[in-house]
Image: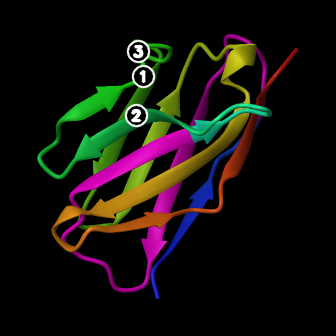
Amino acid sequence: QVQLVESGGGLAQPGGSLRLSCEASGSISSISTMGWYRQAPGKERELVAAITSGGSTNYADSVKGRFTISGDNAKRTVYLQMDSLKPEDTAVYYCKFTRAYYALHYWGKGTLVTVSS
């Protein structure tokens, strides 16, 4: 059974940085897209950033220029480098792996990021 485990969340000050990691355990192959989503209290879950197996990336407008997604398909790991953090980045961050060919999606349980002074 495939499980995604996020790590790296925590408390950061405005202007600070955090690096999130997400690794898949279990047998998983043919990952087409790896991505990060977030959900703030009282809000819907939204896409933060995604990376395809070909290396193409996509970012939410609110994080462009501040966040960087990277991934290693062979290691089944995706990272999110978050710089210049703002209080509005406070949310639970979830990773998601997609196997488009099989129409399968896998979600992590989330890691909390709090940006506050």
Q: Position of residue 106 (x, y in %)?
A: 44, 67
Q: Position of residue 55 (x, y in %)?
A: 17, 41
The image shows residue 64, relative to residue 46, as above or below, that is above
| Mark 2 burial class by Cα count in 10 Å: few <14, some 14-19, many 20+ | many
Q: Amino acid at mark 3?
A: Lys
In this orientation, which residue lies closer to the viewer: 93 or 10? 93
The image shows residue 82, relative to residue 24, as above or below, that is above
The segment highlighted magenta reads: 11-37
How far is disc 3 from disc 2 in space, using C-alphas?
9 Å
Secondary element at tag 1? loop
Q: Residue furthest right?
A: 117
The earlier-in-sequence mark between 2 and 1 is: 2
Mark 1, mark 3: which one is toward the viewer? 1
Q: Position of residue 13 (x, y in %)?
A: 78, 18
| Mark 1 burial class by Cα count in 10 Å: few <14, some 14-19, many 20+ | few
How far is disc 1 from disc 3 in space, using C-alphas?
6 Å
Q: Is residue 36 magenta?
A: yes
The image shows residue 81, relative to residue 110, as above or below, that is above
| Tag 2 and tag 1, C-beta contact below 8 Å | yes
Q: Which mark is residue 14?
A: none
| Mark 3 burial class by Cα count in 10 Å: few <14, some 14-19, many 20+ | few
Q: Position of residue 10 (x, y in %)?
A: 76, 40
| Tag 1 and tag 3, C-beta contact below 8 Å | yes
Q: Which mark is residue 60?
A: 1
Q: Which residue is mark 2?
A: 49
Image quarter for residue 70? top left
Q: Which residue is mark 3?
A: 64
